[in-house]
Amino acid sequence: MNAIIRSAEESFQNGMLELRYGRPTRALQQFRAAISVASETTSHAKHRAKYFSYYGICLHRTGGSIREVLRVCRKAVTIDPNQPVLWRNLAYVANAAGCPGQAYTALSRAHSLNPGHQGVLGELLDLGVRRRPVLFFLSRTNPINARLGKIRAWMTRSK
């Protein structure tokens, strides 16, 4: 049992090195190997969660479908919801998918788990503060407010 976990962890560490060196395709293979080895044992869910999370990051960086990327990263936080790094990774792919609200929710959860986590704080600062809805008397999710907000953002960027 320990040999299986050690093998999965070695694949994960190799994947992290590949990711650090800018080779997401190779990292993807390593994370996939870690997941397949770890699935042979039902224990150590925390390890499997991080394997899934970084697999999702690499899947995104290699052009995987955003739906699949989000599914994999959500699976990771479902397996172990108490790891701020998993929530940060979910926020990263949600933001890349054009879902800043989901990214903010994930980062808020990560921040509540570890308020001093520098990576999470940096991501929250990068995400920024949302502006007030254009029509304050309508909800933010109202289609009229959403469209007007996009127009306002476009006009602000084009200046």
Image (tube, rainbow, N blue to C red):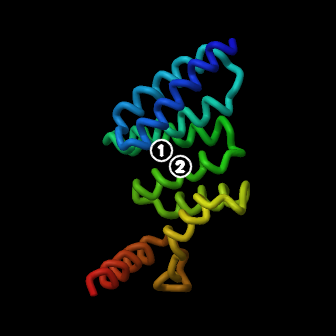
Give above or below for 106 relative to 36. below
Of all residues shown, which one is farthest toward the left?
158
CA distance for labels 2 and 1: 7 Å
Which of these two is toward me, 12 or 108?
12
Residue at the spot 61% in from the left edge and 65% down from the top edge = 121
- At horizontal 41% and vertical 78% (from top left) the residue drawn is 149
Q: Which percent across, then down, holds residue 91?
A: 53, 54
Query: Is 64 located above or below residue 14 in the figure?
Result: below
Image location (x, y in percent) of residue 74: 56, 42
Q: Are marks 2 and 1 in contact (CB under 8 Å)?
A: yes
Q: Position of residue 146 (x, y in %)?
A: 43, 73
Taking 140 as reference, is 42 above or below it?
above
Q: Residue sitting at 46 percent across and 51 percent down?
A: 93
Q: Residues within 10 Å of mark 1 (few under 14, many from 20)?
A: many
The residue that disc 2 covers is 90
> Which quadrant: the N terminus?
top right
Element type where label 2 sits in the image: helix
Query: Residue type at mark 2?
Result: Leu
Q: Nearer the viewer, mark 2 or mark 1?
A: 2
Residue 18 placement (x, y as % from top left): 41, 36
The answer to which of marks 2 and 1 sits earlier in the sequence is: 1
Classify mark 2: residues with Cα within 10 Å, few (<14), some (14-19) or many (20+). Answer: many
Q: Residue at x 46, y 36 (%)?
A: 17
Check the image and report above or below for 4 versus 148. Answer: above
The circle on residue 70 is 1
Q: Quadrant of residue 63?
A: top left
Q: Quadrant of the C terminus?
A: bottom left
